[in-house]
Amino acid sequence: MSQAIKMLNYNKKYHKLFNIEKDLIKSILKDYVVNIYHIGSTSIPFIKSKPIIDIMVSVKDLNKVDEMKDEFIKVGYEYLGEFGIKNRRYLRKGGDNRTHQIHIFSYLDKYNLTRHIAFKEYLLTHKDVAKKYEEIKVKLASLYPNDIEKYCDGKDEFVKSVEEKALEWYKKNKELFIKKEKIFKI
């Protein structure tokens, strides 16, 4: 799949687009949803990003998600199963002009849920790190404007190093997140 990589300034519509999709996901998965989170760069209001809404969903039962595969396909999603991450369900919408990605995990998968939330919260509270991330992504987008694999490979080392710091920071600051209802024990 050839995906053009365009970095855009933050757009207030990202939050609205997330909420529209959140309601759609709830209508499909119903009582199996535990929580739905806006993650990824479109959830960071002060950095450029690809205009793709990343959504993370925690559910009571991944098998029920598999049973709802056709419902997601009907509303425009590709259902790609684990797609490289064990015990995840990955869905994307928009083909070459991707607009949304959904990462679904069991609510019991504290590691994957926490690492995504910790990364986002770390960037929100460490603007210097978020700006460095933006700088790397903008450079990679200019180097590889049509090669999503090279773009992703190019930012992987930075993401992993920040994720490690973010998890440690998150563990030390759990009380900050209790009010946000994003706390997980790791």
Image (cartoon, rainbow, N blue to C red):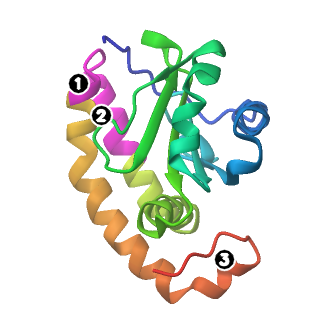
- Mark 3 residue crowding within 10 angstroms, few (<14) / some (14–19) / many (20+): some
Query: In the picture provided, is 108 more to the left or to the right than 178?
Result: left
Residues in magenta?
A: 134-149
Q: Is residue 74 above or below residue 59?
A: above
Which residue in the structure is indicated by mark 3?
Answer: 177
Which residue in the structure is indicated by mark 1?
Answer: 143
The answer to which quarter of the image holds residue 90 is top left
Which amino acid type is marked by label 2? Lys
Which residue in the structure is indicated by mark 2?
Answer: 139
Which amino acid type is marked by label 3? Phe
Marks 3 and 1, how far apart in space?
37 Å
Q: How many marks can you see?
A: 3
Q: Which circle, 2 or 3, is nearer the viewer?
A: 3
Q: Nearer the viewer, residue 95 or 153?
A: 95
Which amino acid type is marked by label 1? Leu
Quarter of the figure with the N terminus: top left
